[in-house]
Each structure stands twice: as structure tokens, then as C-alpha cells.
Image (cartoon, grey):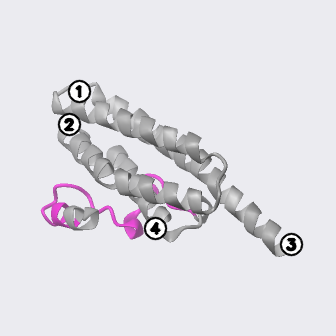
């Protein structure tokens, strides 16, 4: 669903092309293999966040752009969080409850910012920057990497036996 909406907006020059192949130094952060959590679907979702961060950084930002970014995040987070939590449960990740709590907090924060944008609060532009950076730096690169490392350690322990 996200890709179709983006394609239409790109077609009408409403936003820049967010395709992963168009990411580069000139448009912000680039996807690196080290960002992978080892699950293709989750990596694709994380690329969407990276695309949205790059859009936020590379576009003349206004409330309409912020609203678009937040709406896209809102659309995909429920499914992404649910699938990610199911995966963590399947692999027996011991910190699942804490990760679920963090997902709830992030969704709540996202809802708060979306409400502020809807109300026309221009302070949300900076708040969105902080939120997106925190999502990338702390949630994806630290919290999500923790379940990746747990899964790899579990697989290694199983193959050693």
C-alpha cells in the first residue's frame, strides 16, 4: 500500500522518489548491510523508515510533508510491530515484553505528534526530526539488533551441539 501511494505522489512531483535505489549521499543516509536484522520483510520496512528520514532531511520541510511522513509511518507500524513481535516470540527472544512496551510507547508518541501536526503546530517539524532519528538510532540500530544477535547466538549454539 505504501509503495503505491508513494509512486503516485512521485509521479505528480509531490514528494521525491523514495525508492531504495535512489538513496545516496546526496539525499541522506544510505542503507548498509550492517543495518540488516536478518529478516527481509523487516529490512524492507526499515528501509522505508530510512527513506522517510531522508525525505525529511532532503525536502523543504513543511507541515504537509511532516503529515505525509507520519501518516506513512502510522500505516505500516502496526503490521510491522505485530510481525516483529511474532518473530521474536517464535525465536524465544527473552526481552520480548520490553520490546513490546517500547513499540507501544513509540506508537503513542507517533499518535501524539500526528495530533500536533493536525492541529497545525509547527513545533512538530523539529519534534518529528528528533522522533525519526531516535527511531533509527535507538530502536532499529540498538533494540532491533538485539533480537538479531540473540537469534544468531541461538542458531550458533544449536549448530555447535
In which quarter of the view is residue 124 placed?
A: top left
Mark sitting on residue 41? 4
- Disc 3: which residue: 160
Q: Are marks 3 and 1 in contact (CB under 8 Å)?
A: no
> Residue 4 versus residue 13: which sits nearer the camera?
4
Q: Earlier in the sequence, mark 4 or mark 3?
A: 4
Q: Earlier in the sequence, mark 1 or mark 4?
A: 4
- Disc 2: which residue: 63
> Residue 107 versus residue 19: which sits nearer the camera?
107
Chain part drawn in magenta:
7-32
Q: Secondary structure at mark 3?
A: helix
Residue with the most extreme right position: 161
Q: Earlier in the sequence, mark 3 or mark 1?
A: 1
Mark sitting on residue 55? none
Q: Secondary structure at mark 2?
A: helix
Residue 50 appearing in the image: no
Q: Earlier in the sequence, mark 2 or mark 3?
A: 2
Q: Nearer the observer, disc 3 or disc 1?
A: 3
Q: Nearer the observer, disc 1 or disc 4?
A: 4
| Position in image of residue 9 (x %, y %) | 17, 60
Q: Nearer the observer, disc 2 or disc 3?
A: 3
The residues tagged by marks 2 and 1 sit, at their Cα atoms, a distance apart of 7 Å
Q: Are marks 4 and 3 in contact (CB under 8 Å)?
A: no
Q: Earlier in the sequence, mark 2 or mark 1?
A: 2
| Position in image of residue 49 (x %, y %) | 40, 53
Q: Are marks 1 and 4 in contact (CB under 8 Å)?
A: no
- Disc 1: which residue: 122
Quarter of the image with the C terminus is bottom right
Amino acid at each position: 500500500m505504501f509503495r503505491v501511494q508513494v509512486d503516485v505522489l512521485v509521479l505528480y512531483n509531490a514528494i521525491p522518489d523514495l525508492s531504495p535505489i535512489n538513496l545516496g549521499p546526496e539525499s541522506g543516509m544510505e542503507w548498509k548491510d550492517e543495518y540488516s536484522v536478518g529478516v527481509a520483510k523487516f529490512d524492507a520496512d526499515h528501509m522505508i523508515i530510512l527513506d522517510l528520514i531522508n525525505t525529511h532531511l532532503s525536502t523543504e520541510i513543511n507541515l504537509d510533508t511532516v503529515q505525509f511522513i507520519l501518516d506513512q509511518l502510522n500505516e505500516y507500524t502496526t503490521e510491522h510491530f505485530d510481525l516483529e513481535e511474532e518473530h521474536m516470540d517464535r525465536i524465544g527472544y527473552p526481552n520480548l515484553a520490553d520490546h513490546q512496551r517500547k513499540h507501544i510507547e513509540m506508537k503513542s508518541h507517533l499518535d501524539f505528534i500526528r495530533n500536533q501536526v493536525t492541529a497545525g503546530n509547527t513545533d512538530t517539524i523539529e519534534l518529528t526530526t528528533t522522533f525519526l532519528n531516535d527511531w533509527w538510532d535507538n530502536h532499529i540500530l540498538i533494540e532491533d539488533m538485539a533480537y538479531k544477535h540473540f537469534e544468531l547466538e541461538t542458531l550458533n549454539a544449536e549448530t555447535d551441539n
